Amino acid sequence: MSDLESERLPKRQEGSKTGVPRSKLAARVERILTAALSGDSHVTLNIKASELLADAGAVAPAICAVLERAGPGLAPQLRLTQTLRSAGLVEDLLNALANPDPIVRIAAARLCGAFRMTDSLPWLADMVADSRPRVWEASVRALGELGGRRAVDVLMSAVDRIPQHRLAIEIARAASDMDIEALMREPASVQAAVVTVLACGLRHDTLRVGPLSAIAQDRRWPSRVRVAACRSLGMIGDSSASGALGALTSDPDGAIRGAVIDAQRRLKTGGGGPRS
C-alpha cells in the first residue's frame, strides 16, 4: 500500500477500528445516537457541548461509527440533525468554530464533520485558510466528512495550499460520482487534475478505468497527470487496465515508465482490491 493510501483511506472507519481510545462519554453518545437513529423519539442527547468538545478525539469516531452502521440515505442524517437541534447543540458547536482558542476550533471541526453538519461549512471554509497546520487539517478532514458539492468546491479552491495527498484523500471521500465526473471533464488546473485522478484511485473507482487509461496514454496531458493516472489504475487493481498499461512500457517519459511498472506490479499482486 502506498503512502497516499495508507495515511487515510476514504471510507469512514468505525470507532473501534480507528485506534482512538474509547471513553465513557463516547460510549454514551454512541448508545444515545444509535437509539435515535433507530427511530426512538424519546431519547435525548442530554450532553453539553463543552463536554463533547473536551472529548472530541474519542466522541467524533463514535459518531462516525453510528452513521456508518445506519447506512446511506437521508433518513439517518435527518434523525441525527433533529436530535442535535432538540439538544440545543447546533448553535453551540457552530459558535465553537469561531472560538479564539484554536484547540476549541479543532475539536469543533471534528464534531461538526462527524455529525455532518452542513451548516458548519462556511466556518470550515474559513478555517482551511488558517496558517496553523492542525487547524486547517481539522477543517479539511471535516469537509471530507461533510461531503457534497459545496464541500468539494471549498476543498478544490485550496488546491494550491493543501498538500496533494491530503486533498486527494478528502476529495475521494467528499465527492459523488457526478462530482468526480465534472472535475475530470473540466479540471481548473494541472494540480486539480492530478488530485482528481488520484482520488479516483483511492475510491477504487472501476468506472473510471477507461477514462484513466485514456489520460495515461494521451501525451497532450502533462506528465504529472499521466503519472497520477497510472498510479490510480494500479490502486484500482482492475485487470482491464492491463492493455493500456502494457502499451506504455516503452513511453519516452521515464516517470511514466516507472509508474507503469509499479501499477503492473500491483495488478499482478492484487494490490488494488475492491472499493470499500
Image (cartoon, rainbow, N blue to C red):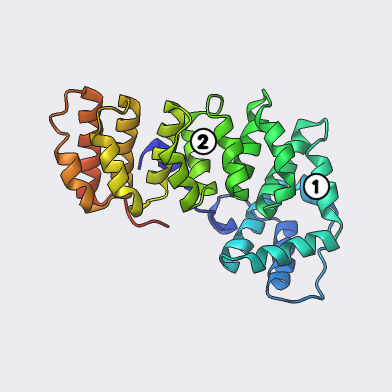
Give above or below for 258 relative to 182: above
Q: Mark 2: which secondary structure?
A: helix
Asked if one can make out residue 113 in the rendered structure from this viewpoint, the answer is yes
> Looking at the image, is mark 1 or mark 2 earlier in the sequence?
1
User: Is residue 19 left or right of 63 when viewed as pictured?
Assistant: left
- x and y, in percent, of residue 270 in the image: 25, 52
Q: Mark 1 points at which residue?
A: 93
Q: Where's the N terminus, which quadrant?
A: top left
Kind of residue at badge 2? Leu
Q: Position of residue 2 (x, y in %)?
A: 36, 39
Asked if 243 appears above or below 82 in the picture, the reply is above
Q: Residue at x 43, y 42 (%)?
A: 199
| Camera-side residue of 123 and 178 | 178
Q: In this view, does 176 lie above or below 128?
A: below
Q: Name the residue under label 2.
A: 167
Q: Where is residue 164 in the image (x, y as percent from the top left)?
A: 47, 30
Residue 202 sits in quarter: top left
| Dot 1 amino acid type | Leu
**Quick one: 152 or 182, which is closer to the camera?**
182
Percent of width and height locating residue 265: 21, 42
**Residue at 26% from the left image edge and 42% from the top image edge:** 213
Q: In which quadrant will I find the C terminus?
A: bottom left
